[in-house]
Every structure is written in C-alpha cells, then in structure tokens.
Amino acid sequence: MIYIKDGYVIDPGSGSEGVMDILIKDSKILCMEKAGRTLDELIEISGTSPAEINADDIELLDAKGLIVAPGLVDVHVHFRDPGFTYKEDIVSGAAAAAKGGFTSVVMMANTKPAVDNIETLSYVLDKGESTGIRVYGCANVTMGMKGKELVDMETLSRAGAAGFTDDGVPIQDEGLLREALKRAAKLGKPVSLHEENPEFIYNNGINAGKAAEYYGIGGSPREAEISMVERDVNIAMETGADLSIQHISAKEAVNIVREAKRHSCHIFAEATPHHFTLTQEAAIKYGALAKMNPPLREEEDRMAIIDGLRDGTIDMIATDHAPHSAEEKARPITEAPSGIIGLETSLSLGIRELVNKGYLTMAELIEKMSLSPAQLYHMDAGYLAVGAPADIVIFDKDEEWKVETFVSKACNSPFIGETLPGVVKYTICDGKIVYNGVCR
C-alpha cells in the first residue's frame, strides 16, 4: 500500500484540485480524501478492514508542497526497437518516460522491420510489458511504410494495435488514405499522420526561410504541411475517422484544424514542446540538435501553436521523442537525421513556457499531457478517482534542475545546459513506484 499525504492533487477528469491524501492498494486508488484525516480514518473510509492492512507494508510519500497528478501520457514516441536499438530500445525508452513522469506511451511503427505484421507488433507489445509502465504500440497504415498497400488493419487491431500511423513518411495516395480512414473508423482506432508533402521539400528538417538561407539550402517550406493537413482533415470528416495531426508546426495548419473542429469531433492535433518553445533561430544556433521534421519555424508559428493549445484547437502535447546517436547528429546539416529526445524535458518545458508565462493553468497543462491523449487512444488513464488505475506523477513545479544527463540512451537535445523548473519526485504506475527522484 502507498500513502500519498498532503499533496496538491490536480484531476483533469473531474476538474477538481486541492490538498488531498491518497491511498493506493494493489493497482488501484483505494481512497482520495481532503487532507486532515488520520491514516486509520482513511482506511475506514475506504471500506477496508484494518485486519487486511499490515502497517509495515504501507509506504508513506510526503507530498506536501508537491503536485500530485495523473501519470502523463505521450502518444508519440520512437523507441527504435526493433532495428535501431543502438539509438534507444523499449526498456531504455520506458525508463526515460518514467523519469519524465509518464506512465503510458504509444510507440510509433517506423522500426525495422516495420510494424506491419502481427509478429513485430507482438514483439514490441510483449517487450513493453516488462518495463513497468504502460507501453502501447501503433501499427503501420501501409505495408513497409511505402504508401502502396494497406496493412491488414482488422487483424492488427485484434492483435492489440492502439492505432495506425506511418509517422516519418506522409501518405501521398489520397484514395489509399481514404480507404484506411474508412477502415479505422469501423475499428474505432485513431490514425495519426505525418503531414509533410515531399514534393515541396528541398532539404528536410530546416525551415525554408532564415534558417535555410543560413545553411545555403532549400529547406522545408510551410506549404508542405499546409497542403496535406487541408487534404486530410477533409477526408477524415468524410469518413468519420479519428484523425490526429502530428507535431503541428505552421500557423496556417493550426487555423485549418481550428476550422475543421467546428464541423467535426473527429479531428485532433498534437504539439511538441520544441515547437511551442523554439523557432528556426535554434536551428542556426544548435545545428542538427535542433533539426526535426517538421522543422522549427517562425515566432508567429510558435505563438499560433500556443494559441491553439489555449483555445483547444490543439488537444494534446506529445514529445515525438526521437533518439539518435551522437555520431549521427554530428554529420553535416543535410546529412544528419531529424529529431530530438523529449521525454525527460517535456513536463519542465510545459511548466516554463506555458504555465509560468501565463498561457495555461497547471490544470490545463496536465489535461493536455494526460487526459486528452488518453481519450484519443481510448485508454483508462489521465484521471484520478477512487477505483481508477494507480498511475500517478508527483512533482515539484518550482524546483529547478540542469539538463546534463539522460536516462535515454541518446542525448540529442538542444536543451542541454539549460536550467528548467519542474522536478519529478515519483512516478507510480499500476500501483508501483517506477521512478524515485527522491532516493537516487
């Protein structure tokens, strides 16, 4: 049993918050009550017989001055397993997630082999079960991510696919995507899309503007994203499928999603911490460490993303955790791979950039990092209530830490050396402490 005492509880499920005590027994929340009662009173309120409780088995977590929230949910991570485990694997990725306060993650399917078959899907799900957190896996939309032939969506759904995505490769065949969305709608599974039309892109990962001019390359223009977002929200509205626009980066794309959501409840969007924190100037300053697809754009785009988070156009924050080796990121800008890691800095960047600057309340940030992503993927997660899964993060919103080392195998982050607010003290998943930042 775990006894969380005097924490400031934020529950996006009920919209309530305040200083409370929480009792956890086995894998569930046994009791949640306003602080001030004794442990014996809490046990009595829970309906549990004192005879069932061994005092020596109760672990007290003093959460006074700390925030207690649902375990965070990230629906966009790359754990590179199978095929690229020198960058990351499912075990190391899950450990990085736990350190960041995440209890549920959804892995993308651009592995080698790709997750277009039951064998690979079973491998990643089985390995995920050994990590201590809840690891879900998407299957691909198309075989081998080649955009030519749909996977057996029905079979993969029955085998446990949380959703479908070819993230990393846009689906250019409009008819094929329409059929995929029709099938996904029948299955009740979301489809998450990487929206960059390669016909517009000269060099990926760098904005076609000031940053591309600095490197003397063509870069990736905003039109690459705008054209595909516009096409795909219309197809989603036709088919009734749940469509998530991944890592939105352009102000025009935010506006397209905003308008589409006025007409459909099936359109969703995610924003990454790097896109609401940085602009193309970071790509000039940090080089390949700030190269990602889609690229960091202009200040107007960054603010449009924040406005989208504020008004609900953008439903969730997702890291797009994308590990690469130091050798790969040291290559010339046009040869280095795109992507940065983000699981261990995500909560802190949300606090610094969104809460401390007055754009979101802490409750709104927690909702976008837990309940909203959980709802898209139909997870029983993202809320705190009696009988709910005991998936919890406890953190100090004010304590600062310096970004120096990572639990992840990778260290490709432009935030190295920065001091950030928000220190995770405990991550609890399924009633067990899976990260302890107090006793390290």
Image (cartoon, grey):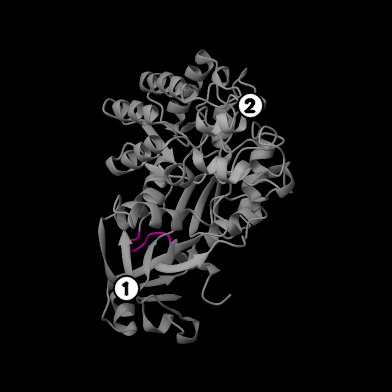
Q: Is residue 385 magenta?
A: yes
Compare residues 278 and 196 and report the one nearer the observer.
Answer: 278
Q: Secondary structure at mark 2?
A: helix
Residue drawn at 47 percent across, 18 percent down: 178
Is 98 on the left-hand or right-hand side of 66? Answer: right
Q: What residue is shown with label 1?
A: 46
**Rendered view: 318 above or below 25:** above
Residue drawn at 49 percent across, 56 percent down: 102
Q: Position of residue 194 (x, y in %)?
A: 52, 30
Is 215 on the left-hand or right-hand side of 66? Answer: right
Q: Secondary structure at mark 1?
A: helix
Q: How many marks?
A: 2
Compare residues 340 and 392 and report the one nearer the observer.
Answer: 340
Question: Is the C terminus in the top left, top right, bottom left or bottom right quadrant?
Answer: bottom right
Q: Residues within 10 Å of mark 1 (few under 14, many from 20)?
A: some
Q: Position of residue 349 (x, y in %)?
A: 44, 54
**Rendered view: 146 above or below 345:** above
Disc 2 from disc 1: Cα separation: 50 Å
Q: What residue is shown with label 2?
A: 145
Q: Mark 2 belongs to which amino acid?
A: Met
Nearer the observer, disc 2 or disc 1?
A: 2
Would residue 396 be seen by someone viewing this image from the given angle?
no
Q: Residue 250 occupies which quadrant of the picture? A: top left
Q: Mark 1 belongs to which amino acid?
A: Ser
Q: Residues within 10 Å of mark 2 (few under 14, many from 20)?
A: many
Q: Is residue 432 magenta?
A: no
Look at the image and give the residue range highlighted in magenta: 384-389
Q: Position of residue 104 (x, y in %)?
A: 50, 52
Mark nearer the N terminus (2 vs 1): 1
